[in-house]
Amino acid sequence: QKEVEQNSGPLSVPEGAIASLNCTYSDRGSQSFFWYRQYSGKSPELIMFIYSNGDKEDGRFTAQLNKASQYVSLLIRDSQPSDSATYLCAVIMFSGGYNKLIFGAGTRLAVHP
Amino acid sequence: ETGVTQTPRHLVMGMTNKKSLKCEQHLGHNAMYWYKQSAKKPLELMFVYSLEERVENNSVPSRFSPECPNSSHLFLHLHTLQPEDSALYLCASSQAWNTEAFFGQGTRLTVV
C-alpha cells in the first residue's frame, strides 16, 4: 500500500466550478497534512495545511480532514484557469525513528474556460 | 532574497563527472531536505538534516553524497551518476519536524 495516495487525473473542471481533490494516507498516527501546488517546471508551493479534523478555509481553498477515515481533501471554489497545476498531498509520518514529509504522486487539475 | 535558493538551476553532466548542487535557506529553519522528483513519480525523500546532523539516508546510492556545513547550507555531491538519475532535485527546509516545508526552485539534472 502506498503511503499517500492520490488519483493522478487529469481532473478537468470548467471555469467557475468547484474542484475537489482527494488524498488517503496509510499511517493512522499522522497528525500534520499539507497541500502543495506545483506548476509545470516549477517547484512545489505550499497552499494549505491542516492539523485538526474538520474543515479549514483560506480564500477559495478549503482543506478537509477526516482522521478516522485517513482522508484529506482540498476544495477549490470558483476555479480559474490559473489554478491549472498538479496538486500534491503531503503527510508527516513517523517512520524509522523520525518524522518524514511524504508526498503523494499528485493530481493534475485542468480548468478550462 | 527568496527563502530557499538552489544553484545551479540546470545541470548537464557526463557519467564520469563530479558536480555539486547547492542549497541555501534564509528562513532561520533548522531542518533541510533533499528530494528527487522523476517524471510521473512521487517526490522521493533522499536525505534529511536536522541541526546539521543527518538523520535520514533512505537507501540512496552512494554516488549521492550530502553535506550540511551549517544550518543554512546544504550540498549534494554527485559522482559517477547514471542516466536514470536524471531528474529534478529539490531542496526544502522547515522549522521543525512536524511543520510545513518550503522548497527551492530545484535543479534540473540531466546525465548523459
Image (cartoon, coloured by chain):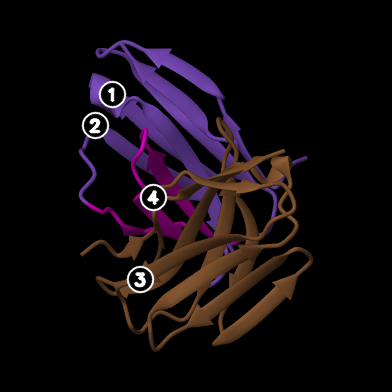
Q: Is residue A53 above or below residue A77?
A: below
Residue A81: give x, y in percent of width and height.
71, 40
Colour that chain A carries in the picture: brown
Earlier residue among tags 3 and 4: 3
- Residue bearing mark 2: B63
Magenta segment, which residues?
A: B29-58
Report the side of A49 relative to A96 (left or right). Answer: right
Task: Please tell me whether mark 2 or mark 4 is closer to you in this view.
Answer: 4
Q: Is residue A54 visible?
A: yes
Report the side of B11 relative to A56 (left or right). Answer: left
- Residue bearing mark 4: A105
Residue B38: in magenta span: yes
Colour that chain B carries in the picture: purple
> In whole angstroms, how far apart are the C-alphas of marks 3 and 1?
35 Å
Residue located 38% across and 40% down the image = B36
> In whole angstroms, how far apart are the C-alphas of marks 3 and 4?
12 Å
Residue located 46% across and 51% down the image = B33
Subunit bearing disc 2: B
- Amino acid type, mark 3: Tyr
Earlier residue among tags 1 and 2: 2
Task: Please tell me whether mark 4 or mark 1 is closer to you in this view.
Answer: 4
- Residue bearing mark 3: A25
- Residue bearing mark 1: B79
Q: Give whichever of B23, A10 is nearer the camera.
A: A10
> In whole angstroms, how far apart are the C-alphas of marks 2 and 3?
31 Å
Secondary structure under badge 4?
Answer: loop
